[in-house]
Structure formats: structure tokens, C-alpha cells
Amino acid sequence: MTAIAPRLPAIGHRSLRNAFELVGALTMRDLKLQYQESFFGWAWSLARPLSYGLVLYFAFGVILKAGFPDYPLFLMSGVFPWFWFQGAVQQSSNVFVGNSGLLKKVRFPRAVLPLSVVLGNTLQFLLSVPVILVFLFGAGRAPHWSWFITLPLLFLLQLVLATAVALLIASLTVFFRDLEHITEVGLNLLFYATPILYNIERIPERYRWVKDVNPLAPLAEGWRNVIMQGSWLPADLWTTVAWTAVLSLIAWYTFHRLEDAFADAL
Amino acid sequence: MSEAALHLAGVSRRYSLAGPEGQLKTTLLHPGAAWRTRRKHNHIWAVRDVTLDVARGEFFSIIGANGSGKSTLLRLISGLSQPTTGTVDVRGRLSTLLELGTGFHPNVTGRENAIINGLLMGMRRSDIEALLPQIVEFAGLQEFIGQPMRTYSTGMYVRLGFAIAAFMQPELLVVDEVLAVGDGAFQRKCYDYISGLREQGVTMIMVSHDLASVERFSSRVGLMEQGRMIAIGDPHEMVAEHLERLAASSPEIRRSIEEGIERAIENDPAARAHHERVLAEKEAARKRKERGG
């Protein structure tokens, strides 16, 4: 018996284009499935962030009177990007486990599963942009020319960050199933640790370190300041860029090391 | 032997008996126990030291009792599982059909499922769309292809699944016990189609319990037992050997095999004559052995 490190047998001319087409087809199928049998269709994808924002507005703005100027817009400019990130990561956490039948029986590039989850949530976020604009005009504000530069940058940064976290958690959950629940609890905590219903200035000095280690904090500040004031990107967004780069490398390395073992571990 | 399409060299696959999460939990909570278990070699060898060459254009079937390692071997060939030791060398584009309807979503139309299935197998969307009319026609699903697949019968699932795998122009087609589900007419159509593919140099590797089809269509058969490929050779001999081993394992199985043979030769004098000749030969061989021993 030889003990040569076994490699996957060649599968032929599997191209990058095939992987892209597969991500697209899976994403469209899942979006269609999600809404095809409901009367209001994609409007339901707006209902969750909207109702969440409404609850926060009532609790903090109306009852506790701890709000900020234009608090509905303040909340919505953070809640919609948050739901994009949260949905992508939470749904990815069990995407390999949930598709174990497929992984055990068909050879295909495994990364397409979390990627299609991220893409689906990204499309839903893009579809919610008109709603954010309604809140903007409702507050008597207007779009700003700098958006052409700032919004695509924020969008890309969050897309890469969400993809990295989704791929990492999806891969690790195969071998450590508790991670699905840890992710759910962790995301819940992360929401309140991120300046979405408050801003960074309100954080007491002794808790400021929390936003320094949270890559989503500068991102959330960025979304809000850009949308509300048309301001430039915050300087500490660089920490998010650094986090994103490091997490992308870790995620890719982890996925690459584990992917061949998925079918046997499920 | 002509050009090889598949080459397995000393392939073995070991599986640990504890689940992966169990292992982690045990390791964290009871490190001592986990270490002892690991030392006790708590694992099984699903496939042991299989060496095999399959030539281009062959129809190679793998038979054996349940749990003999047939399906694990197919998974190793398909690259879904990595051998613990040894090497798997597949030369050419592989198409696998290991399970009925994997990847089909019941609430999506047959057409969309066919496209996603083809993409999963590595085809390009434009190629699948071009082949789709042929796939649909082969599967006999013209009126149903626009319907959600939850309305399909089991037979329709198999037909669509096989048609997609067969039409993606494979060089090596790996099929695990799925054709048995379709009706007789469709099975015949599949085997005819496979014969056509073989003439173009396509290699077929199949696991099946349908021994009649194995005997009829295979060019060679491998017999597996407890993870080992114990014999490779002529389909008739291998099937006979397999039945002999099955019969030896339990009297009930022996009885039902004999009943099956009786039914098969009941109205077929030629088959009866053949069967009697085989029995006589066996008896003579046994007597020779007794006298010799």
C-alpha cells in the first residue's frame, strides 16, 4: 500500500464561469422559492427590517426619549445594512449541513452554496434601497453627489466582509455543529455592540474599546453618516478594511483545508 | 489492455466510527477517554487495498452484498471521498449519478431543476439549454417539464436524472443502483443508450443488485466482500460466485435463489438444460475434489 497524499481526481474542464452561473442559478431559485407562493412577494423581505426599526424607534425614540434627530432615518440607515450582513451570515451557518445530501452525492465547487446565500441577501438589500430613500426624503433631506463614490465603497467592503465571515462559519459548522447556535447568539449581541441605534459619541469612555475591535462599527457609522449627511467615509474605516483582509485570508484558507472532508463529515 | 480510463492503485478508505462532533466533544470533556479510544483504533476499513484498471469503453459492474464497500468505492472514484491510502486516477470527464434526484428541488419546475443539475455537474448553462430538448425527449417528459417536480412520480425523477447525467457528454459515467427504479421499457432505453455511448469510447462503471442486467450488459464484473475486491472477471462467473456466496451465508437466501432459478427456467427448455449442465459440472467437480482430498 502506498501512502501518497491523495488528491481529487480531475473532473474535467470545470470553469470559473460554471461556478458563477451556478451561484446565479441557485440564488435566483432560492429567491423565487422564498416568495413565489406569497401574495406580496418581495415586500416581505422589507417587512422584517421595517418592523424591527419601528420597534426600536418606539422603544428608544418615543418611550425612552433617547433618540437622535431624524431618528427613523437614523435607524433605517443602519438596520437595512445590518439585516444584509446578519442574514448572509446566519443563513450560511447551516448551508453545508442543510445541503448534506447534495454534498455527499455530487461533486461541485462547494463555495457556491455560501456564496449564493450571500448573493441572495445582497440582492434583497439592494431592493430595499428605495425604502431608505423614502425615509431620507421624509426627513426633508436629499441625496448627495459624494454617494457615487462612498456608497459603492461601503457596499463592496461589506460584501467582502460578509462573504468572508459566511464562508468561514459555513465551513466550521460542518465539524462543529454548535456553531450555528453560537452564530445566532453572537449576531444578536453584535447588533447591540454596533452603533446602529446609537452613535459612537454616546458610548461611555470605558466601553469605547468595543467599537475598536468590532469591524462593523466603522461600517455602521459610515452608512449612517454617508446617507444622512452625505459625509465622507470615516477615518477608522481602515480598521474594517484590515479586518476584512485578514478574515478573507483566514476564511479562504480554512475553507480550502476543509472542503475535501465535507462529504465524509456530514 | 487498451487505454485506461480509470486506474486505482491500492485504494483503501478508513472511517472513524464516532461522529465528528462526538469526537470534538469527547476530546474537550474527557481527554483521557478520547485518547484511549483513539489508541483502540475505533474505526472500520470500508474499502481495503483495491487495485483496478478499467479500459476506455468498458462496462464495468461492481456487485457484492450490502455493506461490502461498493458505494464507498464509487464515492472514491467520483472524488467525493478521499482514499486514506492509495491513488485514484480518473482520465476524462466524469459524470456521476449516485442517487436518485439529488439536487432536485420539489417546488421548482423540471426545466429549472435540469439546468441547476447540469450546472452542478459542471456544464455550461448555454450547453445545457441546447441539450435540454433532447434530455426532455429521452426522459419522455415533454408535457411535464414546466411543472414543479413535486408532481412527478419516482419514475419521472429517475428518467430526468439519468437523462441529464447521460447527456452531459461524459467520458466516464458512474451510476449507483438507480436504474433499477425505472420501468422495464425505460431501463432498456437506458442500456441501449449506454451501449451507444460505449461505442463512442465512453466508460461505464455501475453498482447494481440487478444481477440479470449486470450479466447481460457488463463487459467485466468485480465482486466485493468486506471492502476487498475479491475477484474480477467474466460477468456470468462473477454473478454465479456472488450467488454462491450469498447462498452459503443463509439457508433462506439459498431457498429463494433456488426458487428464483426454478421460475426462470420453468418455461425455457434451453435455460433448463444449461442450468442442469452447470449443476452436473459442479457436482462432478465436487466429487473429483473429494476423491483427490
Image (spheres, coloured by chain):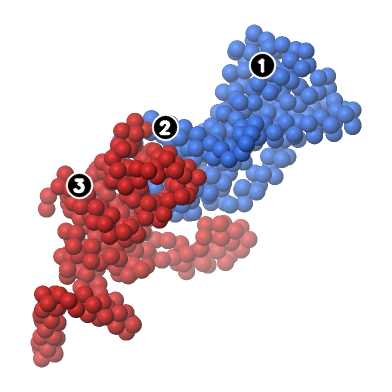
Chain colours: A blue, B red
Q: Residue at x 21, y 75 (%)?
A: B264
- Write down the residue under mark 1: A233
> Could you classify mark 2 by the number of other residues whose Cα lies within 10 Å: few (under 14), some (14-19), or many (20 or more)?
some
Q: Nearer the viewer, mark 1 or mark 3?
A: 3
Mark 1 — on which chain does it sit?
A: A
Which residue is farthest front?
A: B143
Q: Quadrant of the N terminus of chain A?
A: bottom left
User: Can residue A244 be seen at all in this image of the molecule?
Assistant: no
- Write down the residue under mark 2: A21
From this view, report whether residue B278 is shown above or below residue A175: below
Image position, residue A21 (x, y; %): 42, 32
The amino acid type, in three-letter code, at marker 3 is Leu
Q: Residue at x 23, y 56 (%)?
A: B188
Mark 3 — on which chain does it sit?
A: B
Q: Are marks 2 and 1 on the same chain?
A: yes
- Write down the residue under mark 3: B197
The amino acid type, in three-letter code, at marker 2 is Glu
The amino acid type, in three-letter code, at marker 1 is Leu
Q: Are marks 1 and 3 in contact (CB under 8 Å)?
A: no
